[in-house]
Amino acid sequence: MAKGKVLFTCSECGGNSPKWLGKCPHCNAWNSLLEGVAESAAPVKNRFASLAKTAVAATLADIEASDVARTPTGLEELDRVLGGGIVEGAVVLIGGDPGIGKSTLLLQALDALQRAGLNTLYVTGEESGAQVALRARRLGVGQSQVSVLAEIQLENILAAIEQRQPAVAVIDSIQTIYSELLTSAPGSVAQVRECAAHLTRAAKAGATTIVLVGHVTKEGALAGPRVLEHMVDTVLYFEGDTHSSFRLVRAIKNRFGAVNEIGVFAMTDKGLKGVSNPSAIFLSQHEQPVPGSCVMVTLEGTRPLLVEIQALVDSGGPSPRRLSVGLERDRLAMLLAVLHRHAGVACMDQDVFVNAVGGVRISEPAADLAVLLAITSSLRGKPLPKGFIAFGEIGLAGEVRPAPRGQERLKEAAKLGFAQAIVPKANAPKKSIDGMTIHAVERVEEALEVVRGLN
């Protein structure tokens, strides 16, 4: 690949400068010049060539659409997050904290794909080939035929992909790769954007599925330019506490499947193993019901999960604290106000702590009812009945609003042996569910009355 002249372009006005300046000489914007490469005078291949051949415009009715073929990775939980398997020519970006298990998961997936007869390539920029082989032996795949390339120069990686034509290639990680076209260091915004663009073009042109491993910031977001997430087809986040054996893989973006799907893995001495019943992770094992605990059914993509919501209400000082883990803190303050205004339960002089067991994060409002019932149970010191679940959104007027796909939530709870449920009236099933008594409510105070009657 021919070298080009380094050029700095203003992100505000598009003006060019031969050197970096603090202020754009054209529009006077500060810190807006980004490093790039000018077009070479020599007749070289355009580095900004289209990802597809030029075609004439056509109406949607005239375009023939077909389902994309998927290849299972051999890891059922990973396939669930990807939407059924890998897609030819797709680009996947996976991020997570250091040591969470990204490289382990991808090495296991490549080994399974290689044993299925696919040509695979593992490009490591952070480790040597010997280190990768050592990890493979720990995982029990030391005799795997996965090709390993220890390289950080983009041009050499593209040449290896073009020569080997792998079905799946893993780049671990995108922050270590650099292009000779740019003078900035590996991991800089310009390098990450340029290398990702070339790798994406190679995936689309050669029908190779490319998986990019990305670093994350202290806040847990993917490091580098946000445009990186827009360029790829799928964005996965690897979540979990390094002190816990359980890991979650969550799809944030997926052009070939549903978003917000999660895969649940357990870290063992032989690598990551899929968890067939993830609800067991998020339910504490209490011999007898305890105050401040309420089980809800949440939806993660297409999968219903049972999660235990725990609350602790204790006497506070003049400035009571509101702390939530796994739930929105601002929503907790709103729910406490609704509880006081419409149900007459005051917590203004109490510290309130709420936690979603197992480290899961719940963003849907269907957890509102379970949170309020757990808080009320802790405040009164009375446990909820054994085998009890609740879900539903709470409005500011005190109404209990329906949650999407309520029938699936109830069936999942009944399958795991739960016998009592408080749900929004709109989610009440027309046909009774065997072994489960369902109480349909319309308001918060009505739900609290039902709980008093059960106790």
Image: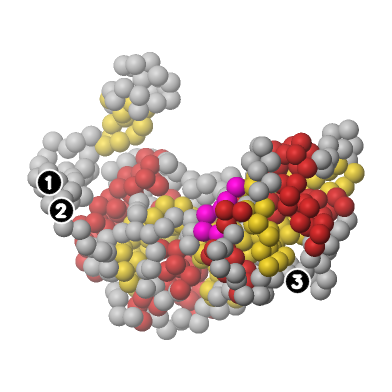
Which of the pair 420/296 is nearer the observer? 420
Q: Which residues are magenta?
A: 401-406
Q: Is residue 365 visible?
A: no
Residue positioned 30% across, 48% down in the render: 197
- In the image, is residue 273 above or below residue 381? below
- The answer to whether the residues at label 1 and label 2 have Cβ atoms under 8 Å apart is yes
Residue positioned 83% across, 71% down in the render: 288
- In the image, is residue 410 above or below residue 17? below
As helix, strand or loop, the secondary structure at mark 2 comes to: loop
Residue positioned 68% across, 60% down in the render: 439
- The answer to whether the residues at label 3 and label 1 have Cβ atoms under 8 Å apart is no
- Residue tagged 2: 63
- Residue tagged 1: 58
Q: Position of residue 46 (x, y in %)?
A: 16, 43
- Residue tagged 3: 285
- In the image, is residue 112 above or below residue 106? below
* Mark found first going from the N terminus, 1 or 2: 1
- In the rendered structure, find residue 270 and report the number of the disc placed on it: none
Q: Position of residue 410 (x, y in %)?
A: 59, 65
Q: Is residue 83 magenta?
A: no
Q: Position of residue 59 (x, y in %)?
A: 14, 46
**Quadrant of the rendering where the C terminus is positioned:** bottom right
Q: How many marks?
A: 3
As helix, strand or loop, the secondary structure at mark 1 comes to: loop
Q: Quadrant of residue 370?
A: bottom right
In three-dimensional space, the C-alpha distance between marks 3 and 1, rounded to whole angstroms, equals 59 Å
Which of the pair 278/16 is nearer the observer? 278
The amino acid on which the numbered mark 3 sits, given as a three-letter code, is Gln
Q: Is residue 404 magenta?
A: yes
**Within 10 Å of the Cα at label 2, are there few (<14), some (14-19), or many (20+) other Cα atoms?**
few
